[in-house]
Amino acid sequence: MESEDDSDAECDLDCDIDSQIPYRVFVVCSVGLLLVLGYYNIPNVLAMVRATYHRTPFSDGQVYPRLYQGSHDVTPSNEFSNERCRVQFVFTGSKSNYKSFPTLQSWMRFADPTCPIEFLRSNHPFLGQITVAEARVIGALAFQPILQADMLKLLAIYYLGGLVVDLDVQAIKPFPQAWADVESPLAFCDVVLGIEADCYDDICVKNFVRKGQIQNWAMFARQPRSPFLGELLEFIVEKYDSMAPLDENVSIQEVAGSGPITDFVQIYGNFSHPFYNAPTSQWGWTLASDPSSVLRIQKHHEEVCVVGSRYTGGGCLIFDECLISHHFEGSWQHWPRSFNRSKVIH
């Protein structure tokens, strides 16, 4: 015969179990709610929800993450993060015979072992953060991989931070130490862009798209969502809208490449004269007169640095300041001739 004490004990056990179930549901729901509320402030949440992204096709037949109505009005977290340590390469289209692909080994050698090295394609989960306007542009550029790659590089450096480099770019100094540590001349730079070549006159510019042209084969952001890069993306989207549909003779560099990047630096800094003639030191040096100098634009609580050609420019390898070596594989040359790399705008 079951004792009264035994019955009470069984009741206590059953009651405890019954009371724990709603509590566990409450805890799970609360944690989920906190994660949702913290989505825009906790970068790591993105990685936790990647598996839930819905997929949607673009006109090129590929499948992409659904492109949500993102915004640039998000303040980067001040907490320590490892975004600056990222190294990212962009792949678009079907090209696979990259002659200079072994340069990847240099990044494995010079990048800090804690730095992720990632290959980004046009279906990467981070595209779930981009704005509707950005999604429209990158989708429309799918027919021309080199144009889409330029746009994808800018989106990557804005939404992910770190360093985005072309496949034919070789590391020759430690990363991110040479780009961001306190002993580097770039120690306080939140964004780093570089002059492509020392060309500042009407003769040499025939081989480029701008005087003082800024290269887009290596760009750095200390953390995601730089105000400068956010406004640059808006500028490029507006320019694309003014050009669409693209003319068959459009310059590759005029869509999301060196052309608009160089133009925007001029506008963003509100310079009354060419930015490459703006003083970079108390002695009056400029990017044009001293290719080892750094132009610093301080705005929106960040420092945007445009480095002279000796840092990331073509052929900088002979100079002490040089951070990378660009091998000029010229992937753009493999696309239809109707698309020109350069169409000079004076």
Image (cartoon, rainbow, N blue to C red):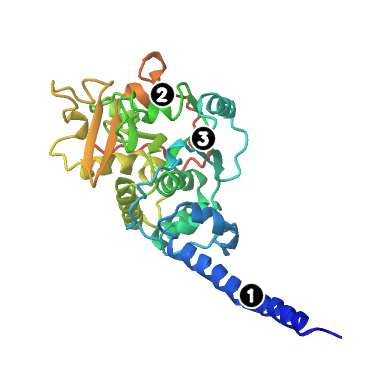
| Amino acid marked by disc 2 | Leu
Question: Residue 50: where, in percent of width, then height?
Answer: 56, 57
Mark 1 falls on what kind of element?
Answer: helix
Q: Is residue 2 left or right of residue 78?
A: right
According to the picture, the residue beneath numbered tag 2 turns out to be: 323
Measure the alpha-carbon separation of dots 2 and 3: 17 Å
In depth, the one of 108 and 289 nearer the eye is 108
Residue 313 visible in the snapshot: no
Quarter of the figure with the N terminus: bottom right
Q: Is residue 311 left or right of residue 136?
A: left
Mark 2 falls on what kind of element?
Answer: loop
As drawn, the label of residue 21 is: 1
Q: Residues within 10 Å of mark 2 (few under 14, many from 20)?
A: many
Measure the alpha-carbon separation of dots 1 and 3: 42 Å
Q: Residue furthest right?
A: 1
Upstream in the sequence, badge 2 or badge 3?
A: 3
Is 60 situated above or below 212? below
According to the picture, the residue beneath numbered tag 3 turns out to be: 115
Measure the alpha-carbon separation of dots 2 and 1: 58 Å
Q: Is residue 55 left or right of residue 9?
A: left
